[in-house]
Each structure stands twice: as C-alpha cells, then as structure tokens.
Image: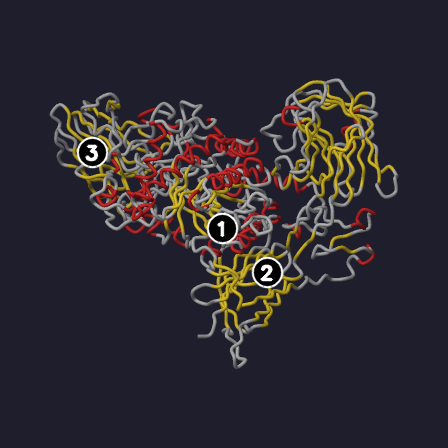
Amino acid sequence: MKKKTLQRMLCTVMTAAMFMSGCAGSAREQKDTTLASDKTEEADSAGKEATTQNEVSDEGNSDGTGKGDDAEKGDGAEKEDGSQKTDSAEQGKIEEVPKTYVLNVNAANEVHEISDLLYGIFIEDINFAADGGLYAEMVQNRSFEFGKLAAGDELHAWSNVGEANVKVVTDDTKGCLNLNNPNYAVIENTSGAQAGIENKGFLDGMAINENAVYNFSIYAKGLDGYTGPVYVTLKAGDKEAATAKIDAISGDWAKYELSLTSQITANSNVRLAVTIEDGNAAIDMVSLFPEDTYKGRKNGLRRDLAEKLEALNPSFLRFPGGCVVEGMSLDLAYDWKDSIGIDENGNPLYFNDTYGDVAARKLGQNIWTNENTSNDQNPCYMTYGLGFFEYFQLAEDIGAIGVPVVNCGLCCMGQSHGRGAAVGTEGMDKYIQDALDLVEFCRGDENTTWGKVRIALGHEAPFELKYIGIGNEQWGDDFFKHYEAFVDAFAKAREEKPEMYGDIEIMFTSGPDDGDSGHAMYMDAYEEAADWLKENPDKSMKDFAGAIDHHYYNTPDWFLSHNDYYDEENYSRSTENMLDKTYGGGINVFLGEYAAQSNTLRAALAEASYMTGLERNGDVIVMAAYAPLFGNLVGLHWSPDLIWFNNTLSTASINYYVQQIFGQNAGTKLLESSMDGAAIESTGVSGKIGVGTWNTSAEFSNIKITDNDTGEVIAEPDLSSEDAFKGEWEFVSDGKWSVEGNVIKQSSSKTDTYRYGTTGTAAYFGDKNWRNYTLTLTAKKNAGLEGFLIPFAVTGAEDNYFWNIGGWNNTVSCLQQVSAGAKSDRIGGTVKNCSIETGEEYELKVVVKDTNVKCYIDDRLYIDYEIPPTTKYECYQVVSTDESGDIIIKLVNVTKNAHDVEINIDGALAEDGGSLLSDKAVVYQVAGDSPDNDNILGATEDVTLESFEIDGVSDHFTYTVPMYSVTVIRIPRNK
C-alpha cells in the first residue's frame, strides 16, 4: 500500500483513540477532535496570508498566495472578489461589487446521456455502521461467539444478575445450536431467587422509548430437568421498563418469542435481563429488536438511519466494503455465503426448517477491530445479521440496485501484503465459484441451489443485479492474474448460461489512490486492460471490465482544482489512446469511494464542485459514492462520515445534504453550457525554497536565491548561528537540524514516513511570493539510504514541488508534487537514473521561470519540465435535463460573496416565438455563512437542504447565488 494511504489509515485510528481517551468536551469539540484531517488543513492554512479563493478556492492568482505581482513589492491588497488593488491608498475608499457570472445554456443541444446510476451510496461495516448501527439488533454478542479480542471474551457485554453462575460452553459440537453457532451460555442458579444474565447493548448502550414495542427472541433449553419459567426484563438503572415471562421450556433447543412494551424513555444504563428460578438452563441467540424497524421488516434496520439513506434518492447501493471484503487474512474476509449460512461443505445450511436463518450464520471478525488488544471494550465483529440478502433487500426498498463486492482471492494488500490463494488452485476456485453463485442467488429460481435460499428468505422475485466488484483497492501483477481468472470464468458462464450471466459486468480496481498521488499504481491498471485487449482482439472492453473502481480521499483544494479530472482531454473515451491521457481512459469509471477529508461546509462545497464534473462526464462515470457512510463517536475508525449517530440520535452532515441535492436532482442528459467570469487561470509557480532528505542524513551550504530577470541576489539565509538559522527556517519534520560553520546539517538517517510521508524530513526558507528565481546550493550525503530533497514553489507543507535526487532507494532523480496534501508519484518526463555517493559534494541548481523548471547537478541538466496550467473556479456549474423535461441548473458558489448569475437559455423558444419555459422554477439550496459550518450530532444543524419557488423565469433572467452555496434551479418546460 502507498505510504500516503497507510498514513491516512493510521491517522484515523489514532484520532479515534485520542477521542476515546477523553480528550474532548462538548459535542462540537468531540466531533472536531475526530476530524484530524480538517484540523491539519486549518492549521496549515492559518499560517498563510491567503490560501483559498474567498476562503475556499485560491484567491487572486492561481499560485495560491493570494497576491499578484504587485504584492511582491509590498503594496498589494486583496479585493473581496479575489482580484488585486494595486494602490494601497484606494483601500477603504471603494466598496467592492461582487462580480457577475454569465451562464449560457443551449437547451436544444443534448450533448450525451448521463448514467442513470450516477449518484448512489456505499455501506461498509466501519464505525459500527452495521452491528450497533443500521442493523437494529440491540443485543451485543447475542450468541456468545465473541473471542479473545473482546473484554470478557465470550461473555463480552454480558454481566451476571443475582447470584447465578454463568459460563459459556465452547466445545459441545453435539449439543450446540448448530455448527455455525457453537457457543452457548449456561445459567446455573441455586440462590433461591431469580438470577441470570443481562446485556448492555452496543457502544453507548441501548435506548428505549415509552410505549414502544420491542420484540424479544431466544433459543433456550432446560438442563437437569429445568422446565421454566424464564423471565425477561427490560430495565433502565433501577427502574423496570418492561417484563414478560416464558412459562415453560423443553429439554431441547427451541426458539421462544415475546414482546415487551416499555413504560419509560431512557438512553443510558438500559439493560436486557434473562433470569431463571433455581435450576439450570442453556440459552443462545438472545435478541431484541424494536418493532418499529424500517419498512416494518423482521431482522430489520434502524428506521431513522435507513430513512436517511432513502432520502438521498440513491440509484445504487455498494456493499459490504471496502476493506472488510479483503480481511486481515482470507479466513477473516467477509464471505457472502457466511452471511446467509452454509455448512462445512459450503452448501446452504438448512436450520429451523428453512435456509438463511440468522441463527445459522457464522460470526465474522471485522477488519476494523483492533487485533493488537485482548481487552477491547468495543470490539468489532460481524454477526452477518445484516447480510447479503438484507443488503439487496435494502437496495430494493430505497429504490436502488445492489452492487456487491466480493473477495478476489487476496486479503488486504495494505495491511496484510495481499496474501491469498494462488491462481489455478482449489483455494482460488472457491472465490470464483462464490462470485458465480452470487449471480444465481440473485437470479435463480427454486430449482437452483442458491436461488432457493433467496426464495426461502422471502423474496421470490429476482434481485436486480448488473455489476459485481472483484476485490477492493487491490493492484499489481498478482491482483491482475487473479482478476483475469474471474474474467475467464464469467466469459465461460455467459457462454454456457446466457440467460443467467449474459449481462453481468464485473469491475476491477486501480488501487487506493488517485491518478496524481498514486500515478504509477493507478496507470498499471490501465496498462493491464490495454494488454488484455491486445491479447484478445476479438473482445471489447466490457468483456474485460464493465468499470474500473477508483478510490481517493483528498483535501478540499484537490477537489476544487480537479473538476476536469474526467474531461475528455484528461480521460480518453477510446481504448485507442487510453494510455496517452493524464488519467487513463477507455474504461467506464465507478468512483466507489471519495471524500474531501472533513465535514465542514468547506469540504462539502469542494465535493459539490467536483460532482459537477462527475455529472458533466456522466457518459463515462457510471456510478459515484461518498465514503464512509456512517460515523459513531464512541466507536470511531474513520472520519469524516456522511451520517453521524448514537444510540438515540442521527444527524446528517453538510456533505450529506450535498449528496442529497445532487441525488434528488440527477439529470439523464447533459445540456451544452458554459460560464463566463468565474475561472481563475494559473499564471506560474511561486513560493519558498527548501532542503530535505528521506531516510538520509546530509548537509547543505552555499544556499543562494537569485532573481532570473535582474541577476540580483534575492536572499541568502543567515547560517551564522543556531538562533539565526531556526528563526528563519520552517521545519516540518522529525529531523535533527543544526548549523555549524555556515553549513546546515540534518543528522538523522530516519524519516517518520507515517507522519511526514508527503514532505520527508524537510525545512523551508524564504517568501512564498518568490517567482522567477534560481536556487543554487552545495549538498553532501553523510549516511542513509537515499539522497536529497530540494523543495521549491513552496506555499506550505501541503502545497509544493520538490526535486527528489537519489529517490527510490538511491536510483532515480525526478520531480514530485505535493498538492493539497497529496503527494504525486514520479512526474512523467522528469525521471532519470541517479545515484548519490556518500561523502561527495554536489552542486545543485533549480531554475524556476514562469511555469518552467530546470534542474542541474554539477552543471548537467537533469530536468526540463513545463508545469501544466490548472484552473479553478469561483463558481462551478453543470446543466442537464431528465425525463420530466425540466432544465436542471446546478451552481456551486465557493466564495464568501453572493454573486448574480445572468442565465441565458437558447433553444427554448417555440416556432411562434413564445417561450417553452415556465415562468416559475423550484430552487433547492444548501447554503451557509462560514466555510467552518459543521452539523454536530445532537445540535441544531448549521446547514440543511431547503427548497422554494421563484418566478420571473425566462430564457434570459438573473439569479443571485448566496455565499458558500450549492444551488439547483429546476425550470419546467411548458407542456
């Protein structure tokens, strides 16, 4: 796995640990504490005079400094709209008028169709999203199957009531409920009073409401002649909320069910107790569900959470992961057949006169649990109560199609190095057959092995299925061999059973990063697809893959500056030149996971800006989903998240409302449109310089920065003393920095690549407004694995370029870029072989002129690179239509000002000159008053989705978009 991805994972886990150790106070403080990436972003931007355009996108020139050329002279000042006042005397005299944008729409030109599956959702059991979250089961460890990772082991979440002796039987293969559920609890009571066991629920505990009904069930059998009764009590503290009784039980396992109606409302210290009189009894699968589940389904889902999913109007539901699909090892990977119950031979397990009973589903260990503990208060297991059947049922209930992901025969490549079954072995054949059987589960009739399981579970009609993901965030040759085995198997299945498999499309992955920070890994996937096509000239790309699965989690600035990521100039629509474009092409895209690393309005607007690009390129992007979906502060593995919840409440993030406004107003055809006045074109690079290393100690001297135009020395650092050195330089590393004899020494040969994976051991010097300069210095390696890092155009630790000399274990010289906190791979066209000798001095030179960079070692030219221009916008737009005929205008204003938008719609006049448009429109809007707005669990939401009607609409009208807003204007056409 790339260092960046490992760093990201570790940071989220560390952040969760920080929260759980009690470093937070109020609800807002608690949530902010979990958002480490957002705080990092804010801390970095706090040291800049202006990092963002009107607080969100880059202000002024695209160099990100917020200052134009005149600012270098010290007399510039920023205007409200991001342009520059060149005369400081003007300040305070002229009230700035926010600029007007012009949106031109051609309603008669439908450019191309947009995928009808574009906006959907992705559920992974992370942050207790399933058990303890969406899955409405209230009893934790209901079948006593938890293991050594959990505090209390098999009795985790349980405690004794009265003077009972309670033990868990783990080795009774003949007397257990079934082989998938081998453990059971035995209550021994000789106290003369009721005694037994009680359960505290998940995380922050159970919550109950007055007059609400709760459905209880249990498997029980009397031991040593005990025939009952069994008492069931729901209590909050010392108050009894409800009680009921099973009058008699037999000496054989049987399921008993009853209902409890709570007399009180409580959300703390609520417990479910099961007690007996004097005697012995065995119990298993102790369960409590609210009767009020989503759609009223048994074994159902928490209604408030599921309704929030439905309100997004998603077109697809990707499940169950994510990393849970891979597992830390193959035996711990999510197994869809375990989620419906199978026997030791892999066949459907018939239990309780049916197939698929939840009591016949084997407990799984979630990859997100902490494997390094043996006393986890909140261990993460998978009951599979929310299994593949329930996921497909949920997809259908919310109006979506299910998009399942299955294991490719490899475990997690990031955490377990991708160990797995070898292609061509019986072990690998299992995973291929599992994928084929999944199709039969969804489509088969009662005469098929797996179709009859779906029918037994209550769904006679087939589930809708089109796509199956093969693997998650896998990459490299071994994965490609595994994936091709699936390609061959599905090709054979289509040929033999076209009615079953003919239209199924499988998808492969490009790893865990975008085409910038993980370029080589990412492009390897496209090279694999291109090679397969060459080897199979009679086949099409869809025979290989229906889509490629992209995942990336980047900063808001990255999303703002990559709106054109999938434009045809960057992503080819043809297989002929699929390797010639910056981000590949020739394959449809499933953007399976993305997020802007924060739940603030700043991040939500950045995601919205990017989504206009997704919709504009909806001809090649078939699906896109935010991730993760659910977050719980008590059991947090990852943040940010779309929906936050506890045992009582759920709150939608601002990001949620952005997803909702797009999902509820998805277009089906793109209309031609353009906007004038909103673009911010890049004009060249500027920034500080620096020195650094990667797992290497080195020294640097004779550092000089010269003006390219005048030849004058701009600056030479003062290295006369430690105080002078440390007063002028900015350190973003764990290095051991010192100065001696006008020489900078970095004496550590190790770099903390988790904390400083994007920067290395680095130090920065100078002015971020420097441009058109030459840096010269002398460098010497003293020890270590590599060579030197020479940063330039540094506007901060999260935004810079650097010359990597002796990188990749002292083998290459190349340029790399850190953009919005994401580090690129080796930039194409800059890579040369290079090895740095220990003890030898090297004369280095970096010439930065406009957008050109030249790099020299001992006067030998190593790099001559033209930095490509980038474009950001103050306002982003996309226009579409759908089956209703409405013209759907989406506008994302990322600035701190409201702006008038002149909207001109051509092609909307009838032959008689009358307008084809209604004079009224419906406006949907997500807007705030600060980029730091954040919806906090339990508090009034800062930002929501609102709607209202406007009139005065015509083919030429003006609408004012509020500051920091996402606006959708739906204009009906006259019938």
Residue, disc 1: 621
Q: Which is more foreground, mark 3 or mark 1?
A: 1
Residue 226 badge: none
The location of residue 287, given as percent across then percent down, is: 26, 37
Visible residue check, residue 648: no
Give the camera-side residue of 229 and 84: 84
The image quadrant of residue 189 is top left
The image quadrant of residue 101 is bottom right
- Indicate the secondary structure of the residue bearing disc 1: strand
Residue, disc 3: 219
Give the camera-side residue of 764 and 645: 764
Dot 3 amino acid type: Tyr
Q: Earlier in the sequence, mark 2 or mark 3?
A: 3
| In the image: residue 924, left or right of residue 870 | left
Query: Going by the picture, which residue comes out furthest to the front?
Result: 538
The location of residue 768, given as percent across then percent down, is: 75, 41
The image quadrant of residue 804 is top right
Dot 1 amino acid type: Ile
- Indicate the secondary structure of the residue bearing disc 2: loop
Residue, disc 2: 962
Query: Does residue 346 sit above or below 899 in this rendering?
Result: above
- Indicate the secondary structure of the residue bearing disc 3: strand
- Distance of mark 3 from mark 1, alpha carbons? 48 Å
Q: Residue at x 24, y 39 (%)?
A: 356
Instruction: Give neighbour class at mark 2: few <14, some 14-19, many 20+ (Cα, 10 Å).
Output: many
What's the image's color scheme?
Answer: secondary structure
